[in-house]
Image (spheres, grey):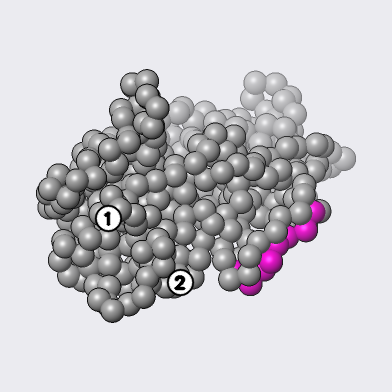
Amino acid sequence: MTPQNATKDMLGRTRLIPVKDAQEILKSHLAGAARLTEKISIECALNRVLAEPVRSIENLPPHPRSVMDGYAVCASDTFGASESMPCYLQITGNVAMGEMPEGAVNKGCCFRIATGGFMPEGADAVIMHEHTVPIDDTMIEIVKGGGAGTNIIGVGDDIRDGDEPLTPGHVLRPQDIGLLAGLGIAQVTVYKQVRVGILATGDEIIPHTETPKPGKIRNINSIALAAYVNQAGAIPNDYGIVSDQKEIFFPTIEQAVKENDIVLFSGGSSVGVRDLGEQAVEALGPPGILVHGVKLKPGKPVLIGLSGTTPVFGLPGHPVSALVCFDLFVKPTISRLSGIQLESATPQATVSAVLSRNMNSAAGRLDIVRVRLVRDGDTITAEPVMGKSGAISTLSRAHGYFVIDEESQGITQGSIIEVIEYK
């Protein structure tokens, strides 16, 4: 709760705090949050988060296989073979795909084998086609030998019986689905998807399908935030445009808190005569407001609260500010409530680039600078996309962003920066 006697600034904030401090406050209140699970088929498991480890009950592969097209041989028969001193082997068999080989490879002999074929008994290496010369249908010349294990994947070389190749908190990717299929696993236990309620506040907001009259603006935030929620692996629930009137706004946000794991409202975090965001969060019950205002550009007036165990975010009305705050605060919250182990998650894609112009910053403030990437030969240049916080086109034109931290007063032209790419 906000202290009753605390001095507030013109935006209703008691004190701006660093972004990292706000993130840590939020993280500490999310520790130990309960998460529900469900069992689903692997066909529906893409981008879902594992709640239980995947344990193999078999070796993969269960039998040694060739990883090249060529000939299955006894490695000792090819020792020292070269173009100037080849060795000769009799072709005494053929490994058919999908079938166990018949017979064994004896000394001085070999079997034809394709990539993925099961290794015949007696063979411990595969000589690839490129290192052989056919003499006739029954004999080949080996011009480069191979040691035991050459071009073979052995029993359990991929995964061994009892291994746990996937652990709780892992976000399942297409390749992981393939691994599950390879192990014969049809279902996995995952965390249920986080539900996110979205409200747009303000009597000046109209549906995006309508033509705005003077003083009215289209609802950008609800549509964009819902897309961001989907991209983060959660389920958006749109509560539409909600009036600034207390008797309408309060019951709607209370309903959203009951029906969702996270609630977002945009437009009410810059406190004015008709903005009821802070009052609403305080009225929802303890612990109430955790953060109101951070040292961030854009996105300074963000409000972060908690109603019981449900995080409530008051995002700025300006679309760019709202979406920056989503990236910094809401997205990590979705990840934590989804069960994702952030420490082991796939790192965000970054690109090293040369900054095209000087960028100034106020000391003590974190600046998020949107950039467009331009490639010229081997050089990638980052061109800042300039515009006001309400200009949604600055996000659409940008390929990513870089951060100017609180200790810096800017970055000079020609500096190498790390650009975090937008998906």
**Location of residue 394 in the rendering, given as x and y in whole percent from the top left corner:** 57, 38
Residue at 40% x, 50% y: name it: 316
Q: Is residue 395 left or right of residue 323?
A: right
- Nearest to the observer: residue 233 or residue 362: 362
In screen coordinates, is 164 left or right of 79? left
Label 2 is placed on what type of residue?
Ile
Depth order, front residue of 66/242: 242
Q: Which residue is mark 2?
A: 17
Image spot of residue 189 (x, y percent) = 22, 51
Q: Residue at x 68, y 45 (%)?
A: 384
Q: Position of residue 19 (x, y in %)?
A: 47, 66
Per the rendering, the mark at residue 364 is none
Q: Is residue 178 above or below residue 246?
A: above
Describe residue 87's horizontal placement relative to residue 19 as left or right: right
Choose top left, top right, bottom left or bottom right for residue 21: bottom left
Q: Nearer the viewer, mark 2 or mark 1?
A: 1
Identify which residue is drawn at 38% across, 32% down: 215
Give the residues in magenta.
406-413
Question: Which residue corresponds to mark 1?
Answer: 277
Q: Quadrant of residue 170?
A: bottom left
Q: Earlier in the sequence, mark 2 or mark 1?
A: 2
Main secondary-structure element of the magenta-colored stretch: loop
Q: CA distance from mark 2 to mark 1?
A: 19 Å
Query: Cβ–Cβ below 8 Å for labels 2 and 1?
Result: no
Q: Is residue 55 visible?
A: no
Q: Secondary structure at mark 2?
A: loop
